[in-house]
């Protein structure tokens, strides 16, 4: 379903449709958290000045933003709490997971 389809699709009306929508929303939120963990811990950084590249590589800026999402305060903490709520996990759980990842120091 494309973004345009999602905007024009009627809201779920039956209990089954509502449950399916809730499952999709939770899966999306979990995917966002999973991607942030992957980006923050990426060891290969993409350098746009070099040819080729790696599909699993992230830019230093993306890695830093993911690190801030997982550990930062202020607006990052608010975003983390909202995504955790949508995913059905506690922000404290995610923060404990992030704390066990030694590569979450700021980028040089």
Image: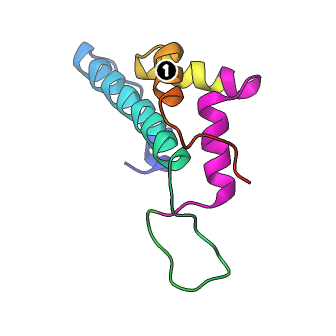
Give the image location of residue 97, x and y in percent.
46, 26
Q: Residue at x 22, y 19 (%)?
A: 16
- Label 1: few (<14), some or many (≥20) within 10 Å? few
- On the rendered structure, is 40 left or right of 47? left
Give the image location of residue 57, x and y in percent.
50, 64
Q: Secondary structure at mark 1?
A: helix
Query: What residue occupies the far left of the structure in this picture?
Result: 16
- On the rendered structure, is 89 left or right of 79? left
Front one among 67 and 21: 67
The quarter of the displayed image where residue 51 is located:
bottom right
Query: What residue occupies the far front of the structure in this picture?
Result: 102
Front one among 15 and 103: 103
Span of residues in magenta: 57-78
What is the magenta segment's predominant secondary structure? Answer: helix
> Quick check: 31 above or below 71?
below
> Quick check: 59 above or below 88?
below
Tell whether position 69 is magenta.
yes
Q: Residue at x 67, y 20 (%)?
A: 78
Q: Which residue is mark 1?
A: 96
């Amino acid at each position: 379903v494309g973004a345009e389809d999602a905007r024009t699709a009627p809201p779920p009306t039956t209990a089954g449709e509502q449950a399916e929508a809730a499952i999709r929303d939770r899966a999306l939120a979990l995917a966002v958290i999973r991607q942030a963990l992957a980006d923050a811990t990426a060891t290969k950084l993409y350098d746009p000045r070099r040819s080729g590249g790696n599909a699993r590589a992230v830019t230093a800026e993306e890695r830093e933003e993911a690190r801030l999402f997982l550990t930062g305060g202020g607006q990052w903490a608010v975003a983390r709490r909202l995504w955790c709520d949508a995913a059905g996990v506690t922000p404290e759980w995610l923060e404990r997971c992030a704390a066990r990842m030694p590569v979450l120091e700021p980028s040089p």
